[in-house]
């Protein structure tokens, strides 16, 4: 038998009976296995070799043109009661969902090899890590899972060890079961289903990213958030970054932003020159997902459950993210980028020059749109980042000093503010969101709330999720301070007021100063804001009046905002915790008092 764990063998047998593959391959994660798969994919055209002189070890995959991104409308959370999935999820009853997707899986691997991928999310020896097994018929998924997770023999050994321990206690072995097939890559026959109570994922009909690499969004966030709730930890859509000051002290910050708000850039930030000269350093632990749990000292300790980056290529260049660019010069899988005449990967903004072949493999013609797909990706080991922190392998995780929420808010929301306490911070996270851009939806300037950046990823009812967050505030807890940032505030001329990128370290410095008690602030009804003198701004070019606007709190605008937050909380009905409603009412009352005080002064 391939595994000493009978429950695993039985499940693999069951899946094989349903899908009827020609061969079954248990992945050991070895270099030899990776080389064999790579050669096979190069031979059948699944992968194309890129220029091995400029990009050694790099390959290109072109996905089906109708399979280029996550598909939220086809992504389901299948809890027995719809109310438990909440209005934040698409839902189907488990029996109906299993029947629907199993009919698609029936015989789908005939003529194909079925790969069994044991993987561990997080350092292999960490008590915070959790394991899963993905069964797939896509060798491209195997290659990506090898980069994105700790995959193969060590993961299987942990699953078997934990399984044996559970059985000894009379319990069921606990590992997440993920079944994936590319099927026919037909959008009409595509589902991404989650069964949280069964720790099971079933994904059919897509070979792309978050739909197919089941360790990422499906396990580490949707199933992970559900598991985290029952086990007392947090599975979050957050980057983790270490900020080292000139005294050699490192503070770890976890930050949640909706997709496409620059999480990877912040995780790999390069300090402005003046900061570098003084000795500031930035260390990358993770760029997308953070698992946190309280340690014995009451602080929250975090790991990055992933081992690699699945980053968006367009927007990654020498001015925005030199660290990411340096990471992807070798041993990288590119997906849906364009190619130059000398066979190098290319996307808009990377450098001057034009590609010869677009993401679909057609001769490049600007009339067909961008050469690289806007959601084209690189898959690369986190260890290849120059800013990678060896602490990312620390079994205990890193202690989190600050949690930062943010979104794209062209108006109203200041550059940075600090929540007054944990409950207020949870409200700030629940209320966060971005204004839509024309490219995303066609509707410009519409605010979409995306609580904790988890809207597409929370595996249960948001109201219960807010209650879970609030539950961490208990005796003995030494919780991180919570902040909100907005790098995207615009002036009346429609231009950004803040330069962003490396300059964001100035804001992080204030945040860390607030955590260790060295930075000043003023109290306002929405929280604590830096006064102009509290930020170090030497060497940054801001337009006249920009700082005033960036740190302004418009009371009437905020009154409307907080009312809208109240209406948003109402959408989760009785599942919204009363504590959160009280917090919203407290902020509303503080703002109203400010209006009354202003009126009294004026009269
Ligand atoms: O479109 C996809 O399948 C990828 S989505 C993704 C990938 C890496 C990090 N974050 C995301 C996201 O959508 O948040
Ligand atoms: Mn993400």
Image (spheres, rainbow, N blue to C red):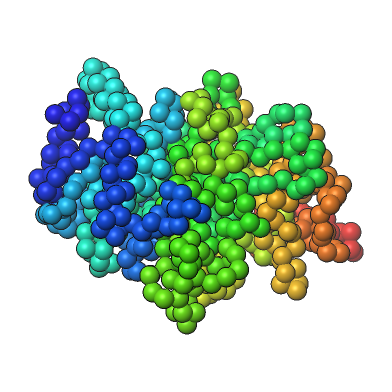
Residue 169 seen from this side: yes
For residue 62, side relative to residue 329 (left or right): left
Frontmost residue, 550 versus 467: 550
Q: Residue at the far bottom: name it.
A: 367
The percent position of residue 4, horizontal first and vertical second, equals: 19, 25
User: What is the number of callouts on the image?
Assistant: 0
Q: Residue at the far front: name it.
A: 53
The percent position of residue 6, horizontal first and vertical second, equals: 16, 28
Frontmost residue, 186 versus 415: 186
Residue 434 seen from this side: no
For residue 203, side relative to residue 233 (left or right): left
The percent position of residue 418, horizontal first and vertical second, equals: 70, 44
Q: Residue at x 44, y 40 (%)?
A: 306
The N terminus, quarter of image: top left
Frontmost residue, 27 versus 528: 27
The percent position of residue 144, horizontal first and vertical second, equals: 37, 47
Tell me: residue 163, above or below residue 305: above
**Image quadrant in which you'd find residue 415:** bottom right
Frontmost residue, 144 versus 598: 144
For residue 492, side relative to residue 350 (left or right): right
Q: Residue at x 36, y 63 (%)?
A: 62
Q: Residue at x 46, y 79 (%)?
A: 365
Q: Residue at x 48, y 25 (%)?
A: 395
């Amino acid at each position: 038998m391939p595994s000493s764990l009978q429950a695993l063998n039985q499940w693999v047998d069951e899946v094989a009976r349903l899908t009827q593959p020609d061969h079954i391959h248990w992945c050991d994660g070895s270099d030899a296995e990776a080389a064999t798969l790579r050669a096979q994919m190069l031979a059948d055209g699944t992968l194309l070799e890129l220029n091995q002189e400029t990009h050694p070890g790099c390959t290109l995959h072109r996905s089906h043109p109708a399979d280029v991104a996550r598909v939220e409308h086809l992504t389901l959370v299948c809890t027995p009661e719809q109310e438990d999935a909440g209005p934040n999820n698409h839902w189907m009853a488990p029996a109906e969902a299993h029947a629907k997707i199993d009919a698609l899986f029936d015989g789908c691997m005939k003529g194909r090899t079925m790969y069994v991928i044991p993987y561990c999310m997080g350092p292999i020896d960490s008590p915070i890590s959790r394991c899963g097994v993905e069964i797939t018929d896509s060798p491209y998924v195997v290659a990506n899972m090898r980069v994105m997770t700790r995959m193969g023999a060590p993961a299987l050994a942990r699953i078997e060890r934990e399984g044996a321990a559970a059985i000894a206690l009379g319990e069921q072995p606990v590992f997440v079961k993920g079944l994936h097939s590319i099927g026919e890559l037909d959008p009409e026959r595509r589902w991404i289903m989650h069964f949280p109570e069964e720790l099971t994922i079933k994904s059919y009909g897509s070979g792309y990213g978050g739909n197919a690499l089941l360790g990422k969004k499906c396990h580490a966030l949707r199933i992970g958030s559900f598991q985290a709730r029952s086990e007392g930890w947090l599975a979050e859509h957050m980057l983790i970054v270490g900020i080292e000051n000139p005294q050699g002290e490192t503070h770890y910050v976890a930050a949640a932003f909706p997709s496409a708000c620059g999480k990877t850039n912040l995780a790999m930030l390069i300090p402005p020159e003046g900061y570098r000269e003084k000795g500031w350093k930035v260390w990358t632990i993770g760029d997308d997902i953070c698992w946190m749990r309280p340690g014995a000292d009451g602080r929250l300790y975090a790991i990055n459950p992933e081992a690699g980056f699945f980053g968006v290529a367009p927007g990654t260049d020498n001015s925005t993210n030199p660290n990411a660019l340096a990471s992807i010069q070798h041993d990288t899988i590119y997906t849906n980028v364009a190619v130059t005449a000398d066979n190098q990967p290319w996307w808009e903004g990377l450098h001057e020059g034009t590609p010869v072949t677009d993401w679909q493999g057609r001769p490049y013609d600007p009339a067909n749109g961008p050469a690289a797909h806007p959601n084209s990706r690189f898959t690369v080991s986190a260890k290849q980042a120059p800013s990678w922190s060896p602490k990312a392998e620390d079994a205990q995780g890193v202690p989190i000093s600050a949690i930062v929420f943010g979104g794209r808010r062209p108006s109203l929301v200041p550059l940075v503010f600090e929540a007054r306490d944990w409950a207020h911070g949870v409200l700030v996270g629940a209320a966060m969101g971005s204004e839509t851009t024309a490219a995303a939806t066609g509707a410009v300037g519409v605010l979409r709330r995306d609580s904790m950046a988890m809207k597409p990823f929370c595996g249960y009812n948001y109201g219960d999720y807010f209650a879970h967050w609030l539950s961490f505030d208990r005796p003995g807890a030494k919780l991180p301070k919570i902040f909100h940032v907005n790098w995207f505030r615009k002036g009346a001329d429609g231009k950004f007021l803040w330069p962003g990128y490396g300059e964001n370290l100035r804001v992080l410095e204030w945040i860390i100063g607030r955590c260790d008690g060295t930075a000043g602030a003023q109290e306002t009804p929405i929280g604590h804001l830096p006064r102009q003198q509290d930020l170090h701004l030497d060497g940054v070019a801001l337009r006249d009046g920009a700082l005033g606007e960036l740190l302004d709190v418009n009371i009437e605008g905020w009154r409307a905002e907080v009312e809208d937050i109240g209406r948003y909380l109402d959408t989760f009905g009785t599942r919204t915790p009363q504590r959160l409603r009280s917090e919203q009412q407290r902020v509303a009352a503080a703002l109203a008092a400010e209006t009354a005080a202003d009126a009294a002064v004026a009269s």
